[in-house]
Image (cartoon, rainbow, N blue to C red):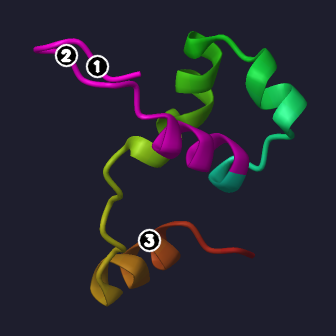
Amino acid sequence: MSAAAGTTAFPWDEVMATGLGLLRLSPKDFWAMTPIEFERAARPFSQPRQAAPARAELTELMRAFPDQ
């Protein structure tokens, strides 16, 4: 079945790869989720990642918050 004119087909390949591969859901759990539950579970993986702190910033944080 093709998508209607002006619409985009649902990205099943990407959704299934995210749910079954990245989130490691069982097929039973994957198919039982609502779209909102799936979006909430996958959200952390769609957020931009922050860069690691520079060495000087890490050193300052270690001074400010020592482990001991």
What type is the residue that disc 3 sits on? Leu
Label at residue 3: 1
Residue that badge 2 annotates: 7
What type is the residue that disc 2 sits on? Thr
State if disc 2 and disc 1 touch (CB < 8 Å): yes
What type is the residue that disc 1 sits on? Ala
Instruction: Please tell me which residue is depicted at 50% across the width and 44% down the height of the picture.
Output: 13
The residues colored magenta run 1-20
Task: Using a 10 Å C-alpha cutoff, classify the residue at mark 3 as few (fewer than 14 neighbours), some (14 to 19) or many (20 or more).
Answer: few
Residue that badge 3 annotates: 61
Instruction: Please tell me which residue is depicted at 40% across the width and 79% down the height of the picture.
Output: 58
20 left or right of 17 in image: right
Q: CA distance from mark 1 to mark 3?
A: 53 Å
Label 3's element? helix
State if disc 3 and disc 2 touch (CB < 8 Å): no
Q: If you read the primary sequence from the N terminus, does the residue marked by circle 1 or circle 3 appear first?
A: 1
In the rendered image, residue 37, in percent from the top left (x then y), is placed at: 64, 16
Quarter-of-image position of residue 1: top left
* Residue 44 among those drawn in magenta: no
Task: Using a 10 Å C-alpha cutoff, classify the residue at mark 1 as few (fewer than 14 neighbours), some (14 to 19) or many (20 or more).
Answer: few
Q: Nearer the viewer, residue 53 or 7?
A: 7
Which of labels 1 and 2 is toward the front? Answer: 1
